[in-house]
Image: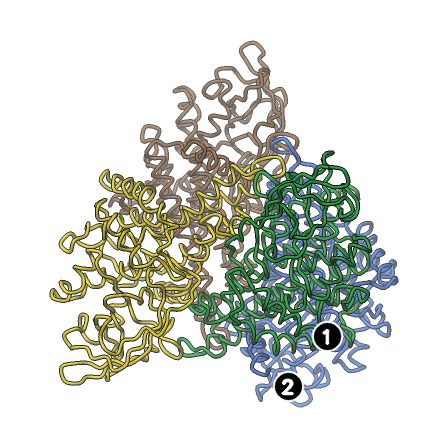
Chain colours: A brown, B blue, C green, D yellow
Amino acid sequence: MNFELPPELLELQAKTRSFIAEQVIPLENDERQNSHGPSEALRRELVERARVAGLLTPHVSRDMGGLGLSHVAKAVVFEEAGYSWLGPTALNIHAPDEGNMHLMEAVASAAQKERWLRPQAAGQTRSCFAMTEPSPGSGSDPSMLATTAVRDGEDYVINGTKWFITGAEDAHYAIVMAKMEDGAATMFLTDMDRDGIVLARNMDAMDRCFTGGHGVLRFTDVRVPATDILGEPGKGFRYAQVRLAPARLTHCMRWLGQARRAHDLAVDYARRREAFGKPLAEHEGVGFMLADNDMDLQTSRLHIWHTAWLLDQGQKCNFESSRAKVVCSEAQWRVVDRCVQILGGQGVTAETPVMRIFTDMRAFRIYDGPSEVHRWSMARKIVRAAQAS
Amino acid sequence: MNFELPPELLELQAKTRSFIAEQVIPLENDERQNSHGPSEALRRELVERARVAGLLTPHVSRDMGGLGLSHVAKAVVFEEAGYSWLGPTALNIHAPDEGNMHLMEAVASAAQKERWLRPQAAGQTRSCFAMTEPSPGSGSDPSMLATTAVRDGEDYVINGTKWFITGAEDAHYAIVMAKMEDGAATMFLTDMDRDGIVLARNMDAMDRCFTGGHGVLRFTDVRVPATDILGEPGKGFRYAQVRLAPARLTHCMRWLGQARRAHDLAVDYARRREAFGKPLAEHEGVGFMLADNDMDLQTSRLHIWHTAWLLDQGQKCNFESSRAKVVCSEAQWRVVDRCVQILGGQGVTAETPVMRIFTDMRAFRIYDGPSEVHRWSMARKIVRAAQAS
Amino acid sequence: MNFELPPELLELQAKTRSFIAEQVIPLENDERQNSHGPSEALRRELVERARVAGLLTPHVSRDMGGLGLSHVAKAVVFEEAGYSWLGPTALNIHAPDEGNMHLMEAVASAAQKERWLRPQAAGQTRSCFAMTEPSPGSGSDPSMLATTAVRDGEDYVINGTKWFITGAEDAHYAIVMAKMEDGAATMFLTDMDRDGIVLARNMDAMDRCFTGGHGVLRFTDVRVPATDILGEPGKGFRYAQVRLAPARLTHCMRWLGQARRAHDLAVDYARRREAFGKPLAEHEGVGFMLADNDMDLQTSRLHIWHTAWLLDQGQKCNFESSRAKVVCSEAQWRVVDRCVQILGGQGVTAETPVMRIFTDMRAFRIYDGPSEVHRWSMARKIVRAAQAS
Amino acid sequence: MNFELPPELLELQAKTRSFIAEQVIPLENDERQNSHGPSEALRRELVERARVAGLLTPHVSRDMGGLGLSHVAKAVVFEEAGYSWLGPTALNIHAPDEGNMHLMEAVASAAQKERWLRPQAAGQTRSCFAMTEPSPGSGSDPSMLATTAVRDGEDYVINGTKWFITGAEDAHYAIVMAKMEDGAATMFLTDMDRDGIVLARNMDAMDRCFTGGHGVLRFTDVRVPATDILGEPGKGFRYAQVRLAPARLTHCMRWLGQARRAHDLAVDYARRREAFGKPLAEHEGVGFMLADNDMDLQTSRLHIWHTAWLLDQGQKCNFESSRAKVVCSEAQWRVVDRCVQILGGQGVTAETPVMRIFTDMRAFRIYDGPSEVHRWSMARKIVRAAQAS
């Protein structure tokens, strides 16, 4: 057992940290952001800066233009990138693109990769992942999938409504989950400018850190060639797992950066601001919160590292990534909530970035499976393992 | 001991409930709201509706144009009003006006009441309470007061900066806390259009339920006649207590209404939305959250009722109002956080009012004394009481 | 609404408080206790002291020799009695006798009352309530009842095993729940010295505050005359509810006394013991715990009072008594756990009574329905109420 | 980074696991235990079994007769040993002996090691660590040390009272902390049969897993040669730190085993016991608790491993061992409390080992520094580190 990071990773960590501090944080109040998130124009500037810094798309293979990082290396770099809410966009590792690229690399055909993945890895395009549906369709329970794909000659014709589709606005292509006539769930690739795809609206969300926000997409008789099926027909849910286990973990990594940022701001405030005759930090009530923050941050980091290492060993980690997702989303939320409390009025106003982190982060306990679904899934596996032993 | 509400109060409760449902909730998405809160135009319409319904300014004495409710009666009516975030504005019982009117009635001279209180009770004007200051001034620790009032002939000349001044924008008058030359804290009354009072900016806050938002006010050589001192010089902190104990409790009442609203929405969603083969509400994980909500709501209500009754008996309730404030702000927050979780994606978007309640409510654990300051104040009193016995 | 206690109740409260302080606490280390609880000899002395003080069996009607207290009055008196773990035994209001007497008074025939209730109300006898069974019988889920009662002439013949039967050792009579041939659950009354009733063993429990401990009872061909059925055949579960709703609440009352005792000891310790240059109580970390204790104690008291008042109005309070049971058992447990923490080493040794209160109280979150069963039952009622509205 | 355990460690882990299952757990109900813990006779049998199995005293160097395990290796082996409450005694790694041997090896002279450490490492003797004192002496705050050591010729004469001295009864030697005339704290080694050392009593503690229990020791004019000073005079507190950082961590390791045991028992119960028509484990309320247990266990393990690895790198880890102690003591306590709840009545009686684990473990949040002291110490270091950066 060994918690040492290799020198080249330490160097990459330091480089990312500087890049975020010097190139990204100064843009946090840039006006090219709207109520949903950074605009495409701001994204392009950020991506260009990362490209120049040699930090773009670090998770994709060198073949496809990335840095080919292992999961453990991603854990280290993504935490640093997450320190600014613009960092993941800059490094091209924001959701859903990061997970989509991972899935494409694992499953797409060579032609599909050239067409969709390579320009995306270069930061030129964005994508969305169209799975979630309004009631009574597929929400936490994917088996309720209602969007259909009907074979018609060499094509499939897709109909359905998707919502909470992160990054839909201005995305270049989509991965769409639909049910075939035999009930099998299949993933389709489609450019977003195809006839019949309409962004009905962008949802008014609590977070505003995702480029493109969260959209409602309508698919009306969208005709997709059978050759644009991603991987094999009927393997939609299996691929969703391929995508989800690591995607859950990269959420944990990025948000850890945000939580650490909030904590640093709270520590800084607590040691400067005085009340009742001494700095806030010398009040036990505040000091205990700082200690709890440190525990929660380190707990998150250790779960991330451990699960990333298992992924690097080739394990599927469905259980461990569920566990890490629940642990991190709840621990990091406690951190940010405590920071708001320590900062007082400044925590609930834009006087500091902490308010923004707070509202950006709340959905983390919900997206990619709410804590309750993961706990339930873990419970079944715990019992099954006990029965087997 | 008796938990029965008298028939006339039950009637007022029912009337308020109907009023909110029929006259106020339909205006919740009215466009006359900005990123800080409802506009003055919307406020005037709401107030007019409440006036017609006979529900305006229920907490002020009949002499001054209100309904002269007891604290217990306020507990019942304010909870109903709080069911909509526009309700308190409609009934003219929103912060800070509600507490300011209470203070004016308790301390102001007859002339001051005629000049400032009577039109305010009629819903024609608004006020703000200018106490909190940026660092290193008066925050949680009021003894750090930095704004000064220097005697000059028959006047006082006030200089200082205040922030987090709720409702400052478009307020008609302010109650300003300033330190006199002898160090004594004194409250001054002043119209807001006086020379030297500038709204530097409106702060970008997480909540947007307060008409006028939260402003930064600059007082530069503001000249206030000595006759506009509120009550007696040097009694500023004492009056702040007169204002705060009941004001804390009315926060608890109003927010209880908001928390109950979120809970009702969550119950409704949980019994309609299906996942994994049955309605959400039939999943224990969700059902337990609903049960916890009910416990937290009832706990809040009981603390409010008990403290209100003590206030009606003439007790000062500094301890009990601190206790109620901590209990309610934390219990109601847990309720709203659970509702967000139950609603999933719809809890973190404007698809339902719950997201709005969530972001509106977070400051409740901070404003009027963060939980930590109240816990500390309670601890000292607990120990002192034990030493005395 | 009115939180005032009538003068005669205040007097009874003061009298009970003095009685516990002067007559009961001095016996807490009396040697006539074993690993299960106070012995019958100690119980008789305690009862005699309460009889002399005019405090014996306050919950039973005056007709039957008690003081005929209302539920609200019980709330006040039982909390005082609970201040010592011997107090409930002294006043003859300990579990399960208190609940059994309540059930007997509500359901038993006049002859049954004379035979079993009157001597019990006089403190001369004890009883047990034989419902819970070892797996796969009736535990949290009463429908799994396995003990049988088969008609044979004028008698019923009972066979089965019961466990966790509080007070079984040396009890004079039992109320036994058994399933008749038609599947209906029925309660039977029987003296404990009847042939076929054997105390297999006394269980080794964490608590030791119950006279007679918790026993395993075997019923082998126990012959009970049909006239000794309690109430009507087949109404066993209904009567269990009659017994349980108030019995749950009296648990809350008694344990509130224990929690308050632990808190008083912790306050006392915290203001005397110094660490790091000042009394423990002046450390925020400790002060916050004292404040939290006060909140939890008062929350418990308010739920108890409110539910007791509803019971006094003739309501069944199944929902409210479940709620109060969960709120109180969890809040009071937090109090006692914090007290252990404040007392440090003295909290985990018999240097103070707090360790004893801690181990005595843990089962409160389990007995008479674990928190999880109550939460589930509450959830169903919340949803049903919403559907009806 | 690498979470892989080397093959020889995996083998040692498996061997320890089998040894505990086959040689130790069958003795758990052996009668040679009293209300304080296992008797010396039982300890000798356990030690002999471990010696035969080649598992005795694994943490001490091979020179001194141990297995010379690293901290990481200890993490793995001690968790296995902790699976039974008799395991640490068997392997000779129970507190306080494990920490005392560590301290002796680090600080004692060669002669002292031969005299006291070698027989102890062979399992022939036991020791105690006499630091904590009754009020107003040294408790959480070691600076309040009241025991004195006065030079008299070649000797020191020690006077004072110590309590909570684990293992005092039948210990062969003690490490005694005393204050010299110049105020410096110094550690002395003394056989326990020296004149003037009296075990005043054994304290009645909630736990009963420590051989020898927790004693009150009186030192009256105890004459100790200056050559029996441990290390250098005046370095008592420094050595206490040398002992404490790893000793805290070994507590975490052993208790992790106990918590895992409780969890395994709860899983087993939950999948066998039925209620409301299905196994307990299929109730979400129970399943969620099992998932939370798994998270808390893994969180504990990761903190232990990380801190152990840092210790192996030669770091002092005062901060990290404080953190691990708070995280583990609180997480493992939550696990055991949940297990009690899942097991219901069987969790609060000796029907299963869980009750015993519950009462044994509560002191873990208190001994070796209560959570509050560690949080405060962490807070100061967090702020200091921020100031330095």
Secondary element at image label 2: loop
Secondary element at image label 1: loop
Percent from the top left, x then y, of residue C330?
Answer: 59, 57
The chain under label 2 reads: B
Q: Amino acid at mark 2?
A: Gly
Percent from the top left, x then y, of residue D147?
Answer: 30, 79
Q: Distance from label 1 to label 2 (Cα)?
A: 56 Å
Name the foreground residue: B288 vs A53. Answer: B288
Residue C55's quadrant in the figure? bottom right
| Residue B348 position (above or below residue A280) | above
Marks 1 and 2 on same chain? no
Q: Which residue is mark 1?
A: C54
Q: Report whether residue B205 is seen.
A: no
Residue A344's quadrant in the figure? bottom right
The chain under label 1 reads: C
Q: Which residue is mark 2?
A: B234
Name the foreground residue: B372 vs D198. Answer: D198
Percent from the top left, x then y, of residue B115?
Answer: 79, 76
Residue at the top extreme of this rendering: A153
Mark 1 closeness class: few <14, some 14–19, many ≥20 residues within 10 Å: some
